[in-house]
Amino acid sequence: MAKPDVSNGTPAANGASSISPPDGTSTSLESSTVSRAKQALKALNDFQDAAKEMFKYPETLGKVEEALDRHDAMEKASKEKDLKIAQLESANQVQLSSHEKRWSAWEEKKSQLECKVKDLEKASEARAGETEKKRAIHEQSLAQVKKELETEKDNVAKLTKELEKANTKIQEANKKLNSCNERLKEWEGNLSLLKEVDFKVFDERMKKIFNRSSKIARTYFLRDLSKEAFSDHTRWDELPKTLKVPLSFPRTNSSAAKHMRMAAALHTLANQLCYGFFKPCYLPESSEAGQTLKEVLDQQYVSDPQKERTTRALLLSTYSLKEVDEAIKEAVQETTDRVHKLLNLIGGGEDSFRKEIKALFHEAANLWKEAQYSTKMVEASTTEDYDHWPWDKFDDFTSAVSETKSQPMLPKFEAINLFPCVYVPEIDHTVDNGCMLWPSQNTVIAAEQELAGLSVKRPKTRKPSFAGGRRFSSDGVNGVKSDERPAFLGEKQRATKTEEG
């Protein structure tokens, strides 16, 4: 192995002078290379010093070769590392270029954004100006609204006061309404007193009363009287005035005379039934008050049937059933005494007659109490219009005597009621047609002839007609009309059966 010439250090100097930084690197890379070159030069100097020492010791020269080999290997590795460093620095440069491009893009975008911000600031300033104008307008509007609001508050305060007054009035009205509702319930409760009447049964019971009245009249007045009964001529002459019936009463027991006494009895009973018992209420007991109530109820019925029902129910609810029964009892007794005393003048003086008429009045009162509590008004009258109401008549007063010769005489009356007519106007139902005595009937003519002592033939009077509808009349209780005479165009007879008893 040749020994290197290390006396003057030329190889080391050549070696040192051959070291140069690689081309194409940046400033940072050059500074790094210089640093490494210095280190390498220092290492070489150290090596030369070490070589000098080695030649002093030949036994270590062999180890120097090994060290040189290791040095070459280390130099090779160093070069590889330098290459890798160069590659990394190149990659770093690429990344740096990329970052620079991105930075340029960001700068451009920033510039654009700044322009947009300026535009937005300008737009914002413009909007701020408009907003300020609108705010000023709104403030003016708000001030106006505040004024209007104050005005409305004043109005609300006034309305509140008025509302309080109205609420007070409403409360008072509600109190009155509640009171009225309570009264209405009471009235409705009173109306519940009224019931539907079975008029088929009612009609039959009314016919029984008619037949009973006829039977009483036949039994006690269609009979002979004693001679002593006719002794007081003055009493017999005043009978028409006393009995309030314009009939002729011969002081005999002729058929005509007995039928006139029977007619007077029927007329008296009819009036007592109609005006004493066939009335809307039995209380108050005064006949004048009862007639006034009937007229009021009739007027209400014409206005509205419901008004009549309500008033009648209210009147009926005023008194208890016990009070009504007591009033009926007293009315029956007083009427019986009055009729017994009155008809005693023409033959009805027996106690049996008193019992008969008392029972008749009781039966009539009990029947009519159902009519009073009926939901439909039931009317009774002895004076319904003679022209149009279909009155029945007793054929007895026509057939009892034959027609006799007479001279012309004016009738003393137009018609005399013998039994009231009873009807239900709301449903146009006739319970009983009632019965009339007409001046054209034979017994009436015969009685007048007998009383006057005449035997000359009397012309036939016109017979009654019953054309047209019903019409209510309010004439007096004796059945005589003075204002007009009816046009008699026909007749309707009523046959009655004599009952045993």
Image: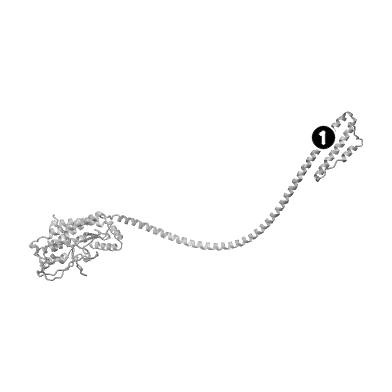
Return the residue found at the far top. Answer: 59
**Which residue does the image show at 88% across and 30% down from the upper left?**
61
Can the viewer see residue 326? no
Q: SS at mark 1?
A: helix
Q: Residues within 10 Å of mark 1 (few under 14, many from 20)?
A: few
For residue 263, say whether it is visible: yes
x and y percentages locating residue 24 in the rendered image: 81, 45
342 or 3, which is in the foreground? 3
Q: Is residue 99 left or right of residue 468?
A: right
- Please determine whether, in this image, residue 204 is positioned above or below residue 66: below
Q: Residue at x 47, y 61 (%)?
A: 159
Locate residue 290, reporting x and y percent. Answer: 24, 61
* Amino acid marked by disc 1: Ala
Quadrant location of the C terminus in the rendered image: bottom left
Q: Residue 463's quadrant in the figure?
A: bottom left
Q: Is residue 439 above or below residue 175?
A: below
420 relative to 14 in the view: left or right: left
Looking at this view, name the residue that lies furthest to the right.
Answer: 7
**Which residue occupies the foreground of this view, 428 or 122?**
428
Question: In this figure, what is the number of numbered marks?
Answer: 1
* Image height of 194 relative to 409, above or below: above
Return the residue at label 1. Answer: 73
Residue 429 image position (x, y, % from top left): 25, 59
Q: Residue at x 81, y 37 (%)?
A: 78
Judging depth in this view, the residue of 165 and 272 nearest the camera is 272
State the scheme by which the image is colored: one colour
Residue 414: horizontal and vertical position, in percent?
18, 67
In the picture, measured across the screen, residue 120 lies left or right of residue 62, that is left
Locate residue 170: give its quadrant.
bottom left
Which quadrant: the N terminus?
top right
Image quadrant assignment for residue 208: bottom left
Q: Nearer the viewer, residue 407 or 378?
A: 407
